[in-house]
Image: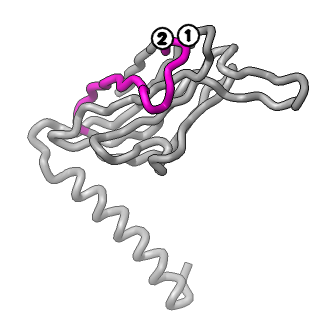
Amino acid sequence: MYDRWEYDVPASTSEEDAIKVPLRISQGVIQQISIGFPSGCGAYDPITGLTTLLARCRLWCGSTPVVPRSPSHYIAADSYIVEIPNQEFEVTKGRTTLTWEVWNLDDVFSHELWIGINWRQFEEEDEVLPTLLRIEKQLQDLNVKLGYLVGVG
């Protein structure tokens, strides 16, 4: 499944006052996240030659950071779509509202960001599938490690 949300982030929104946008999705595994930053999200300084990225965001599932994985980091760009593939982040029952945290350090212009999430949906009655997927991945990792230990692989 795929869904997309847009939000016009007002000018002069600090990180401390970041806007928390709720994103409802069904149970499943997030496979890819795309975040669109339009032109103008960066301010070029001709004296230093550096660009400061003004519109910024993070994605959370409860208190767990989804993107980026570190809660002190953020995603930012200018005229660019940030593609984050191979997430394999489980969204389970009771945790189906993600929080998109957005802020904008531009003191003049608002910036309309968008986020798209592609996920594989679980069946409503399938309570054990997320656990099975986690166990399957752990077994695959273990097989690789064991293969190297005995000289196979």
Left or right: residue 35 compared with residue 6: right
Residue in the foreground of this view, choosing between 76 and 121: 76
Q: Position of residue 135 (x, y in %)?
A: 28, 64
Residue neighbourhood size for the residue with mark 1, other residues' Cα within 10 Å, grouped as few (<14), some (14–19), many (≥20) = many
Question: Which element carries disc 1, helix, strand or loop?
Answer: loop
- For the point 60% across and 31% down, the residue is 76
Q: Main structural element of the magenta stretch: helix, strand or loop?
A: loop
Please tell me the numbered disc located at residue 25: none
Q: Position of residue 39 (x, y in %)?
A: 68, 14
**Outermost residue toward the left?**
125
Per the model, the C-alpha gap separating discs 1 and 2 is 6 Å
Residue neighbourhood size for the residue with mark 2, other residues' Cα within 10 Å, grouped as few (<14), some (14–19), many (≥20) = few
What residue is disc 2 on?
8
Q: Position of residue 18 (x, y in %)?
A: 43, 27
Where, quadrant-wise, is the N terminus in this rendering?
top left
User: Badges 1 and 2: C-beta atoms under 8 Å apart?
Assistant: yes
- For the point 27% across and 26% down, the residue is 24
What residue is disc 1 on?
110
Residue 40 included in the magenta stretch of the image: no
User: Bounds of the magenta span?
Assistant: 8-27
